[in-house]
Amino acid sequence: MKKLRHIAFMFAVVLGLAFSVSAQRDDQKRPPKDPPKVEPYTGPKQRPPKEKPPKDRPGKPGMAFIVTPTRDETFG
């Protein structure tokens, strides 16, 4: 009885997957894509200079290191 249940389950899985694949099929013809345009190499390309941001903004905060004296009384 267990084997019959496994066979029925596998049949249902295969049937469900086949149905989902057939639903995804696209029967419409798509128009062809434009071919890529190839430009001849004319030397190294130069990037335009970047504009510097204004200096009105405050900078990022720096590193802070704090030393505090503590008394350890576990050994004494």
Image (spheres, grey):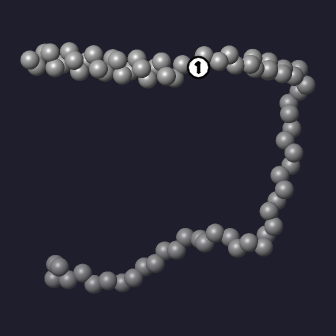
- Residue 30 occupies which quadrant of the picture? top right
Residue at 64%, 69% in the rendered image: 60
Q: Position of residue 39 (x, y in %)?
A: 87, 22
- Residue 28 occupies which quadrant of the picture? top right
Disc 1 secondary structure class: loop
Crowdedness near tag 1: few (<14), some (14–19) or many (≥20) residues, C-alpha within 10 Å: few
User: In the image, is residue 15 above or below residue 72?
Assistant: above
Residue at 46%, 78% in the rendered image: 66
In-front residue for pair 52/70:
52
In-front residue for pair 42/32:
32
**Which residue reaches farthest left?**
1
User: In the image, is residue 44 above or below residue 16?
Assistant: below
Q: In this figure, what is the number of numbered marks?
A: 1
**Which residue reaches farthest right?**
42
Q: Position of residue 37 (x, y in %)?
A: 84, 21
Whether residue 2 sits left or right of residue 13 in the image: it is: left
Q: Position of residue 61 (x, y in %)?
A: 60, 72
Amino acid at dot 1: Asp
Assign the N terminus to one quadrant of the image: top left
In-front residue for pair 42/20:
20
Residue at 79%, 20% in the rendered image: 34
Whether residue 74 sits left or right of residue 59 in the image: it is: left
Q: Position of residue 35 (x, y in %)?
A: 79, 18
Where does label 1 land, which residue? 26
Whether residue 23 sits left or right of residue 28 in the image: it is: left
Residue at 88%, 27% in the rendered image: 43
Assign the C terminus to one quadrant of the image: bottom left
User: In the image, is residue 1 above or below residue 63?
Assistant: above
In-front residue for pair 8/46:
8
Whether residue 48 sits left or right of residue 20 in the image: it is: right
